[in-house]
Amino acid sequence: MEPLDGAEDTVHPEVRAHINSLASALGGTSVDDDGQYQLGDDALQVLRDIKRWIRFYDEKTNRMDVARCIYEANLVQGDLLPILAQWPESAMDNKFKSRMALACFEVLVPLTWPMDRDEERMTVNHHRHMPVLELAQLQYKNAIINFDGARILHMAVRAALPSMAISNGDRTARDQGIIKLVLFFLRNVALISPPSNMPDEAQISIVATIDAFSCQDIFIFLLTLASNMGDDFRTEDATVMEIIHHLVKRVEVDRLFMEEQQLNKATASQLSAMMSKESSILNASKRKGPTRHNRFGTMIWVKRDDGKMSSLSGQDALADAATRIQKMDSNKTFKPPRPPRRGKKQQKGARDLGPPVKLKAPVNARLRSFVEEFLDSGFNRLFQHVRKSIDREAPHLMIYHRRQFFRLVAWFLEAEHARRQAQKRGGQQSDSEVGSFNLIAGVLNQEMFITLSRALHESYEMKDWQELAAVMRCFTQILLTVQEMADSGHDDDGEIAENVLGRLFYEEATHDAIANIAKTYKDQGFDYLDAATELVHNFLRILEAYSKQNVDMQVRTRRRTRRKKQAASQAGETAAGEESDGSANDVEKAADNSKDRKFNFRKFSSKFTQQGVVDTFTTWTKHYRDLNDAQLKRAHRYFYRVAFKQEMSVMLFRVDILHLLHSMIRGPEPLDKSSKMFKEWEELVRQILRKCFKKMQERPELIVEMLFSKIPRITSFLEFGHEIQTAKAKREAKPGAELEFRHTEERDRQVAIVIGAMLDRNESDHINWVKGVLTKAESERRSWAAAHEALPPVEDSVEVQDGNGEPTKPPIYCESLDSFPYLASHANTIQWFALTTPPVAQPCLKTRIYASS
């Protein structure tokens, strides 16, 4: 293809001519009417023709020529918005103007529709038009939310009001389409944001968007839809959720519920912290910064611990000992092999979230008011309906809606926590109905936990890391919310919290999934790492406290057991199978078997001391310069748990981990000493290094193992001095927890309780079997006693003595001779044979014979 010289060659000339002719036929500014916009003779049909061009040319042929021509013709700012401005609020009954407004929105929605950059499906036209159209959408958003002639967003709501006033059962397909059209338009306006390589302009920023949504009554419209979701609106749940998601996705919750003075104080403290960090960085760079003596060469000799000398060049070696050691490490010649070059996968969630948002005080107050009203009236209705749509896989849901659902639930749970904390700080006493946890009960039920668990497993298996991060954040906020319920001091909330925690911790599969997530982190990104470490920290902490309060806590395990075919019920099939395959009776089938067992927290927490989990938290700790106090505390508690609670400090005795811990305290770039966590980290590092030196004296081989990761066999040897005992001693099976009697000691009452429980579970066949066995044993015992009484007294008639003059052993008797007719008829013969047979030959008897005591 020949290179394009001008803009006229970017699209087909005929397409450009058609679009320009339609734009000119739509109307224009009137000279006679004081610059007012004047519609053409057939403006409504022109708008419909433009919509047909977009639908049947751009969308069907996968091109963007029509959208490019519309942008170059300035159709949105020059025609569509002035047409919408001619529809005043007093002319709601004017059908022509309402139709014109709907036709304008039908053109605006595809023009503002989000563009997906799929490298595998993009064509030459996409690469040619997409950068221009992205800038065009920014201009469209600027014109829509800042239009002086009318409130465009409010007009969109006015266009949907007649259809919304009709009941859900009486709405036609056209009414449903109008409501969806308006929602899509609001979604597109909220979604449009500057690209990552462009600065966030003030006129189209999220602050300006929130301000426009508040001033044009869009928040009231969203609250109306959310509070009536499920009754009057059913398929609009995902779009309403998506609009709210794009408005609050990067808003900091802790700053949202601050008053203006608190917000200014927090901003000032954050600024001072950044300035102190900047000054520390500048002071560190001054020691190695350029000076007027840098033109002179420098070489020094450094004496190492082993007495050898090393030469270093450069004036930065004169700074301090840590810099000299770091310079020697950087000059080492060994370089690990580079991994093969692979194309980095585009992370869809990175552009979806964007940078954090700093709200001004007026905008912050407006958004806070909307969030509080949404929590009070629409939270349960909206998210319960979205959760049901996700469970039934509704056709109107997109792939990314489930990720937005979990992310938004986590955000609003955190917002509810922040509101409670703000009320406590202000000393406000809310009434019982509003202040209870009933406002967020829609995401604390068993159905929500099932959806959460299924999403956790599916996203981990499908390696959808963005969705998994959202699920983990939702799981964390649910745990924190339930813990807050338990600590609220109300008896009802405490009982509900205990019940909810029991359900969350009941499935062992969830425990294993969290352990595997923490163990298999590789390069999923910082947001994923933050979510994983936060979930592990809170899950272990809350589970430990819950297991201490509930000593008899049980979890459900799923094991793979073996079962054979039922030969009795399938006699004919089994016989036919034996003719073809002689081993058909031995075919075993695997079946899922669930079993409750007593929970052991120490055994469970040992899963988080494996090398993979240690590496994950080590990777997290490497960002210690960018972490806040809460995030540093998270890593500190984990290392403390591994080293002291689990007594597996050898997992931390690796060169890179010890170097990281030392660098945090005494390195060239240590932790800020003004941080609240500095003292705790300093004490932890000191204790870990102390244990390391002590262990090196006990196990000299640890010096070699410090270079490698630890496997369980080596870990056991280094910690305890011996390898893991693989041979398991046989032990008696412990009875199930439900068969232990803690408050009943009488045997007859225990038997009565067991029989009653079995009858309640319809297990009378087991009781009949036990009765049959006992009856048979009793009859055999009675027959044996009768046979014993019928025998003549052998002791009086026979006296057999050995060489020592001691009498021989008394005669022996056969057990249950009635079941063996031949042996029963020859009982005397058996007794005589037992007396005369040497002791060595007695085990050769084929019948079970016992000596009488």
Image (cartoon, rainbow, N blue to C red):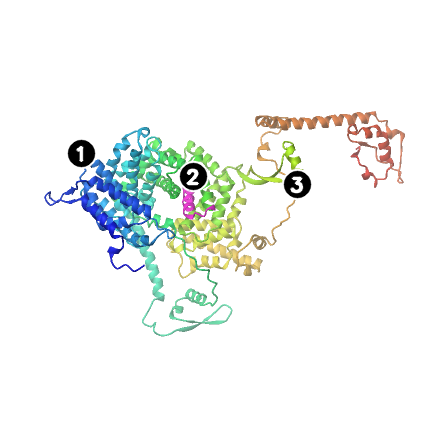
- Please give left or right for residue 28 compared with residue 261 in the image: left
**Residue shown at the point (79%, 25%) measured from the top left:** 786
Question: Which dot, 2 or 1, sits closer to the camera?
Answer: 1
Marks 3 and 2 sit apart, C-alpha to C-alpha, by 59 Å
Secondary element type, mark 3: loop
- Mark 2 touches mark 1? (CB < 8 Å): no
| Relative image position of residue 808 (x, y in whole percent) | 86, 36
| Label 1 to label 3: alpha-carbon separation | 87 Å
- Tell me which amino acid carries mark 2: Gln
The numbered disc on residue 581 is 3
Q: Quadrant of the N terminus?
A: bottom left
Magenta run includes residue 352: no
Q: Residues within 10 Å of mark 3 (few under 14, many from 20)?
A: few
The reply to whether residue 172 is in sight is: yes
Q: Where is residue 519 in the image (x, y as percent from the top left)?
A: 49, 50
In the picture, the disc for residue 483 is 2
Residues shaded magenta: 461-486
Q: Earlier in the sequence, mark 1 or mark 3?
A: 1
Which mark is in front, 1 or 3?
3
Picture quadrant of residue 376: top left
